[in-house]
Amino acid sequence: MSFNIYEPGTVSRSTLAIPSYNYGPGPAPLPPAVLSKINSEFFNVENSQVPVLNMSHRSPEFTRILQGSQAALRTTLLVPETHSILFLHGGGHGMFAGVPLNLLSDVEKAASGVHGEYLEGGTWTDRAMAEGGKYATVKSVEKIDRKTTAKYVYLCSNETVNGTEVRELPVLDTATLVVDMSSDICSKVIDWDRVGVGFGCTRKPDDD
Ligand SMILES: Cc1ncc(COP(=O)(O)O)c(C=O)c1O
C-alpha cells in the first residue's frame, strides 16, 4: 500500500479525490485545509517518524495531541474549568447508557424513588430513554419543572429526526441537566452554568 503525503495548504478536494459534498445529516464535510493537515501529520507526528496510530497513548507526543485537542475545544466552546472534556468511544448510544450508569449510584439505580426525566422531543430522546431505562427508572415529561426531584433531566437540544429544538436551556434547582448536543454543538454559545453533562457524537454514520 502506498500513501501520498501532501504539504498543508496544497490539497484541494479534487486532489484528495473527494468527488462531492455529503449533504446528509450524518457526517459533516471537513475543510480541505484540515484534511490536508491530517494527511501530512498522520504518518509523522512532530517529525517523530511515528504514525499517530502506532503511538503509545502514554507517550509525551500523544499527551500533547490530547491536551492540545482538549484546550482547543475548551476555547472554541467556552467551556469553564468547572467542566472536564472527555473523548470517549461509543458514540451517542454509548452516552445514552453512560448517563444513568454514571449519574446514579448503584443504590440509586435500584431505588424506586430515584429517577431520570426525559423531555419529550422525538426519536433520539426516545432512544436515550429506552437505553437509560435498562439501568435506572426513567420518566418522560412534556415540560421541565425547575424543582423536579429527578436525579437528572435529559434533553436533546436539536432533534435531527423530528426537527424540534430547545433554544434556551432550563435552570434546575437540584437535578443535573444532561444535554445531547450531537447536532448543534459548535453552532451556538452554550450556557455551561446550566449544564451538568453535555455530549455530542462525532462523525455520525450515513444511515442516521
Ligand atoms: C441528536 C442525535 N443524538 C444521538 C445520535 C446517535 O449517535 P450515534 O449514532 O453516535 O449513536 C444521533 C445520530 O445521528 C443524533 O443525531
Image (cartoon, rainbow, N blue to C red):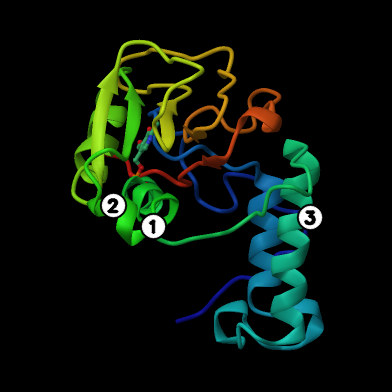
* Circles 1 and 2: CB atoms closer than 8 Å: yes
Which badge, 2 or 3, is on the more N-terminal residue? 3
Residue displayed at 66% across by 45% down: 32
Q: Kindly report the distance in space between the C-alpha atoms of the residues bearing marks 1 and 3.
A: 30 Å
Describe the element under mark 1 as helix, strand or loop. Answer: loop
Q: Which numbered circle lies on residue 71?
A: 3
Describe the element under mark 2 as helix, strand or loop. Answer: helix
Residue picked out by circle 1:
105
Position of residue 90 measured from the top left corner of the image (x, y, whole percent): 37, 58
- Quadrant of ligand 1: it is top left
Q: Nearer the viewer, mark 2 or mark 3?
A: 2
Residue displayed at 78% across by 62% down: 68
Q: Kindly report the distance in space between the C-alpha atoms of the residues bearing marks 1 and 2.
A: 6 Å
| Amino acid type, label 3 | Ala
Describe the element under mark 3 as helix, strand or loop. Answer: helix
Residue picked out by circle 2:
109
Judge the density around disc 2: few (<14), some (14-19), many (≥20) Cα neighbours within 10 Å: many
Residue displayed at 35% across by 48% down: 100
| Amino acid type, label 2 | Lys
Judge the density around disc 1: few (<14), some (14-19), many (≥20) Cα neighbours within 10 Å: few
In the image, is residue 38 above or below residue 31?
A: below
**In what quadrant of the picture does the N terminus appear?**
bottom left
Locate residue 66 relative to residue 184 in the image: left or right. Answer: right
